[in-house]
Amino acid sequence: MLDRRLHLHLASWLGQWPAGPGLHVVGSQRRARPAWDGRLRPAIAVGNASGTVLSVPADRVVAVRALAGRPVERLIPALPAAVGLPDWPTHDGAFRWSLAPAPLPDVGEWIPPNSPGLPAWLRLFDRDVLVVRGSGGEYLAGAGIKRHDAHGHELAVGTVPAARGRGLARRLVAQAARRVLDEGAVPTYLHDRNNRASARVAEAAGFPDRGWRSFGVYPA
């Protein structure tokens, strides 16, 4: 049985859940409003073997439904034009979540996102971010929480090249996931299907691949 928090998150984030067999294109006001970082997410889909919900702005439902009979591999490249943003990038990846993060030791410190020395992507967050610094105070790795709604919070993580291979990312993800669960939400983790390094981090942090997929049109 699907966790109630995840069910509520998907229903809120997409505009409908569960999906039912096949692909369901639904209109949602959230696709026309800025997301957690102030940027639009004009098309987001989540699906599994039982079905997929593709959420788009209400005024784009008809145009996107005209594409719904295509295989997903042909549908995705056509989505930007169908939502009126032909130059925007598409994304296709795995959708994961965890109710039991790996029992890895904490490694990071929660600090404000405007703290000195943080990379630009961590400065997008409006609440504390989780950071690992080196012995000289230099930034090594970090994680942020994308609070999409009260029920589902997506994790993002990054490590500088010189610090990779130390297991920092998996420990940060597990540590951040525990905070999300403590806040009463379910932690989610999305990554490109071809990003094997991110997939390994997810697995090691306690986010198994359940065969779920997420794709859409939104900024990198």
Image (cartoon, helix red, strand yellow):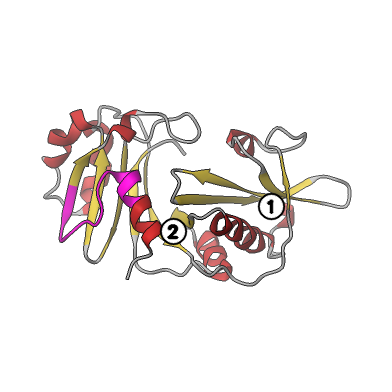
Where does residue 153 sit, x and y in percent of width and height? 49, 50
Per the image, label 1 sits on a secondary structure element best described as helix
- What percent of the width, then of the height, locates residue 23? 18, 53
Task: Tell me if residue 18 is in the magenta stretch.
Answer: yes
Task: State which quarter of the image contains the N terminus.
Answer: bottom left
Q: Position of residue 76 (x, y in %)?
A: 27, 45
Give the residue at mark 2: 194
Establish if 7 lies above or below 119: below
The residue that disc 1 covers is 161
**x 58%, y 58%: residue:** 182
**Horizontal relation, residue 93 to residue 23: left or right:** right
- The part of the image, by quadrant, that contains residue 108 is bottom right
Q: Is 101 rendered above or below residue 81?
A: below
Q: Quadrant of residue 77?
A: top left
Q: Residues within 10 Å of mark 2 (few under 14, many from 20)?
A: few
Q: Tell me the SS state at disc 2.
A: loop
Q: CA distance from mark 2 to mark 1?
A: 19 Å
* Residue type, mark 1 in image: Pro
**Which sits earlier in the primary sequence, circle 2 or circle 1?**
1
Query: Is 195 or 142 nearer to us in this picture?
Result: 142
Q: Nearer the viewer, residue 34 or 87?
A: 34
In the image, taking residue 35 as reference, residue 179 lies left or right, namely: right
Q: Are discs 2 and 1 less than 8 Å apart at CB?
A: no
Please give the name of the residue rendered at 55% of the width and 62% of the height, measured from the top-left corner: 197
Q: Which residues are magenta?
A: 10-24
